[in-house]
Amino acid sequence: MSIICGCPLLECVYCLACARWAWKRCLHSGGHDSEDWGLATAEEFEPVPRLCRYILAVYEDDLRNPRWAPPGGYGINPDWLLAKRGYEDTHGHAPPYIVYVDHEHTDIVLAFRGLNMVKESDYAVLLDNKLGKKKFDGGYVHNGLFRAAVWVLEKEGDLLRELRGKYPDYTVTFAGHSLGSGVAALLTMVAVQNRDKLGNIERNRIRGYAIAPARSVSLNLAVRYADVINSVVLQDDFLPRTATPLEDIFKSLFCLPCLLCLRCMRDTCISEEKMLKDPRRLYAPGRLYHIVERKPCRCGRFPPVVRTAVPVDGRFEHIVLSCNATSDHAIIWIEREAKRALELMREEDDVMEVPAKQKMERQLTIAREHNQEYKAALYRAASLSVPDSYSSEYGTFDDHEDETELSDGSFQERSSRGSSTRNKKETWDELVARLFEKDESGHLIPKKLHSK
């Protein structure tokens, strides 16, 4: 009798638990992910709208006669465009991109377009991966995106090195959207590890911007490369929040809402501590910039606010059940809202009438604060026992007793038993030879395509 009486009680508890979960998930807004972050400034956010326009320019066939230019145009001087690579040039190894020398901003830019849903080669790049398949610099990366990054640097390395020799004071920026964001982020990491390919450029002159980023690197790499890689997320964008491997997302593309909902329910049952300690789990790379323009239970769009941080835990771990989850992924909307957010920042600066000297001092202060935040993120990663969360070559930890310095200035860890925990650094030629081989016409072909 007591058992029979207890069944309705258990049902009530179960229903209340389900109702509480549904209530919390439906009220969870994209703005909650960054509510504790600091606000970005106009100086640090200035490149984002401009790079979004450069990415949009990749879609044009003729930049002298553009067909889909955003309001105000692309901001590109066609005479400064050095290369435009389409699918016939990349042979499907990477998405199309441009190489542009921005003399106005003293920058050499390589910008990638996003996923082309009618190109099988783009899906081939995404599907070339399995969880934990590819290791790089003590962490895990998406294998297909990594191959694409290596292929691009091998193909354009001579051109970039020539440009660096011609313009030694220019920075080198890799930018991309969606699929291209993963290639750009990994290309930044590969370039940092092989700076001789760019004429021994300093690390702080290499920058990467991942717009609507794919989760392409493990947590330790996402934090350690936060000084050179920046990811930009618009409000409820689904891709940076979806821990489902990219290959599974696009296999189920036509049932994406169902996939997101199921993933949301599954992640609710997994503790964040367990997520952080899985070294194979992939994340959006680098420092995060979150553009927030909507508020929960409010209709319409509000003036966009940009928040920034280098988070370790709470790094876009929750999918937002929103009708804007896919539209916020569009590069057109991101460019529009980023431009609007930058204009509001500048208007606020103009109202405050900040003198030029104080602006320069503020830029130095921002750089110092970012460096401190970067160090704090590394310490936080170590305190949470995130695998391989050792310091980068900037030596953000004070204790290097278990590390030896390599010839290139980076550090190699030693275990207490005296055996090295990391392999000897692989040379560029060895890396390319391991991933590719040349066909009769001299083109690089992934080795797996010819393996028997």
Image (spheres, grey):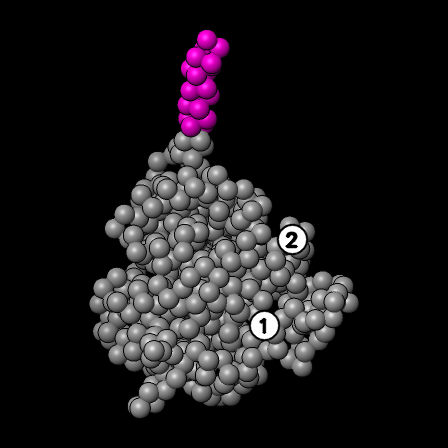
Q: Residue at x 66, y 64 (%)?
A: 391
Q: Which residues are magenta?
A: 1-20
Query: Of the numbered discs in the image, which one, if any, rests on residue 82?
Result: none
Q: Is 320 placed left or right of 407 in the picture? A: left
Asked where in the image residue 41 lies, by quadrant, the reply is bottom right
Residue 62 drawn at (x, y percent) = 24, 75
Asked where in the image residue 54 lies, by quadrant, the reply is bottom left
Residue 148 drawn at (x, y percent) = 40, 73
Depth check: give the residue in front, 244 or 160. Answer: 244
Instruction: Single out the residue that lies furthest toward the top.
Output: 1
Tell me if I can see residue 342 in this picture. Answer: yes
Residue 204 drawn at (x, y percent) = 58, 72
Label 1, residues with CA under 10 Å away: few <14, some 14-19, many ≥20: few
Residue 9 drawn at (x, y percent) = 46, 16
Disc 1 element: helix
Q: Residue at x 56, y 50 (%)?
A: 276
**Residue at numbered disc 1:** 204
Depth check: give the residue in front, 102 or 280. Answer: 280
Q: Residue at x 45, y 83 (%)?
A: 433
Rendered-image quadrant of the C terminus: bottom left
Depth check: give the residue in front, 365 or 394. Answer: 394
Relative vertical location of residue 264 with respect to residue 308 in this rendering, above or below: above
Relative vertical location of residue 97 with respect to residue 263 in this rendering, above or below: below
Q: Is 414 placed left or right of 440 in the picture? A: right
Callout 1 touching callout 2 (CB < 8 Å): no
User: What's the amino acid at mark 2?
Assistant: Ser
Question: Nearer the N terminus, badge 1 or badge 2?
Answer: 1
User: What's the amino acid at mark 1?
Assistant: Asn
**Residue at numbered disc 2:** 385
User: Is the magenta region chiefly helix, strand or loop?
Assistant: helix
Q: Residue at x 65, y 68 (%)?
A: 421
